[in-house]
Image (cartoon, helix red, strand yellow):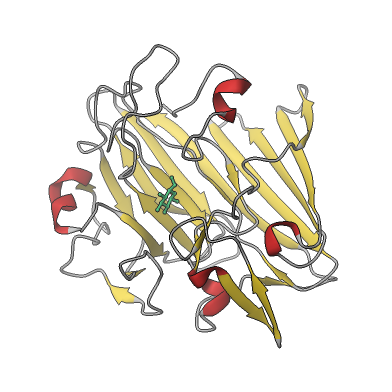
């Protein structure tokens, strides 16, 4: 149900972040620049004039120390991103723990600490197709998202700063809708951050994806304020599964729990600033069931 390869070398080929941990900053930072206090930081412009998913060598392309534990069903991954790496300030120590629970959930727990003020936005970039077959698109999947608002973007996919009501638009997924039903009303397809209706600090249910043919259901829980819903608009068949099947447009989708794109330049958005002495903590759960 997720797009993936059967060997490490295939992941080392150019691919659009299949299954990867994204950092130091998931999604985009406008004009590849941000400020903390009076200091301006310049990042690699790897998406037009903007920076995307951490820059040229983001957390998806670095080697993490891995600590599998079969008795607890966990995999702990650790990485220290050096001060100045990809232009970001501060030595940032990141730990990501994957746990398979007895409730058919994959829990992803992220913690991080820094020795200088920095920005971060960590997410998981898995691509789902609940039919398990990329010969089918995801346009017939139904999706429900607990979000009254979303963050509109400009032509370069940078948030405008506005939080827009989903009511009466193709972004209203408060009730379940087929993804293909209104996708043509959205230029380029869905690639937008939703402002999640959340009330507590605990992981809360924010989205439900379902495929009525297989009966498979994927529920997303998170502590994050946002979620990028991306319908694989840039998948173009270049990448192929191990059996040779091309991964074409709209054959997989991402539900990336996160802070809002370009938050470092949008003081009105929930902050992505992390200071020395603070501990970043975030959790996301993907729960699978059959209906
Ligand atoms: C972004 C897309 C981008 C994709 C990378 C998503 O998180 O929102 O714009 O193309 O990642 O493949």
| Image quarter (top left, top right, bottom left or bottom right) of the N terminus | top left
Q: Quadrant of the C terminus?
A: top left
Residue 14 vs residue 177, the one in the foreground? 14
Q: Is residue 291 visible?
A: no
Rendered position, 245 above or below 147: above
Left or right: 225 as drawn, with respect to 271: left
Q: Residue 220 in the image: state x and y as whole percent.
A: 46, 46
What is the x, y in percent for residue 179? 22, 45
Residue lying at 54% horizontally and 78% vertically, measured from the top left: 265
Using the image, determine if residue 115 lies above or below residue 74: below
Of all residues, the one furthest to the bottom in this rendering is 38
Q: Going 72% across and 62% down the picture, which residue do you hit?
A: 280
Residue located at (45% from left, 32% from top): 288
Quarter assignment of residue 140: top left
Number of labels in the image equals 0
Q: Residue at x 59, y 18 (%)?
A: 7
Residue 62, quarter of picture: top right
- Looking at the picture, how far across and down is residue 88, in whole percent? 71, 64
Q: Nearer the viewer, residue 16 or 101?
A: 16
Q: Is residue 228 left or right of residue 53?
A: left
Q: State the image coordinates of residue 269 (x, y, percent, origin top left).
A: 51, 77
Question: In the rendered image, is residue 220 in sight?
Answer: yes
Relative to residue 72, is residue 46 depicted above or below?
below
């Amino acid at each position: 149900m997720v797009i993936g390869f059967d060997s490490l070398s295939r992941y080392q080929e150019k691919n659009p972040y299949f299954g990867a941990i994204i950092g130091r900053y998931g999604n985009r930072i406008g004009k590849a620049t941000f400020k903390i206090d009076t200091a301006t930081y310049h990042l690699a412009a790897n998406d037009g004039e903007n920076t995307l998913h951490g820059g040229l060598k983001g957390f998806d392309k670095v080697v993490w120390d891995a600590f599998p534990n079969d008795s607890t069903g966990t995999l702990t991954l650790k990485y220290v991103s050096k001060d100045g790496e990809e232009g970001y300030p501060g030595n940032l120590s990141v730990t990501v723990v994957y746990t398979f629970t007895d409730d058919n959930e994959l829990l992803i727990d992220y913690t991080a600490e820094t020795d200088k003020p920095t920005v971060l936005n960590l997410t998981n970039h898995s691509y789902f197709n609940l039919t398990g077959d990329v010969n089918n698109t995801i346009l017939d999947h139904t999706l429900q998202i607990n979000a009254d608002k979303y963050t509109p973007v400009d032509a370069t996919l940078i948030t405008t700063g506005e939080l827009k009501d989903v009511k009466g638009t193709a972004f209203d997924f408060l009730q379940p809708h087929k993804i293909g039903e209104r996708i043509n009303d959205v230029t380029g397809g869905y690639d937008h951050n939703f402002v999640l209706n959340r009330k507590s600090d605990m992981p809360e249910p924010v989205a439900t994806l379902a495929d009525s043919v297989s009966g498979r259901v994927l529920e997303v829980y998170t502590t994050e304020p946002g979620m990028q819903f991306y319908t694989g608009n840039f998948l173009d068949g270049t990448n192929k599964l191990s059996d040779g099947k091309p991964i074409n447009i709209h054959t997989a989708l991402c539900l990336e729990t996160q802070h809002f794109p370009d938050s470092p330049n949008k003081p009105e958005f929930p902050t992505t600033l992390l200071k020395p002495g603070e501990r970043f903590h975030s959790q996301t759960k993907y729960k699978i069931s059959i209906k």
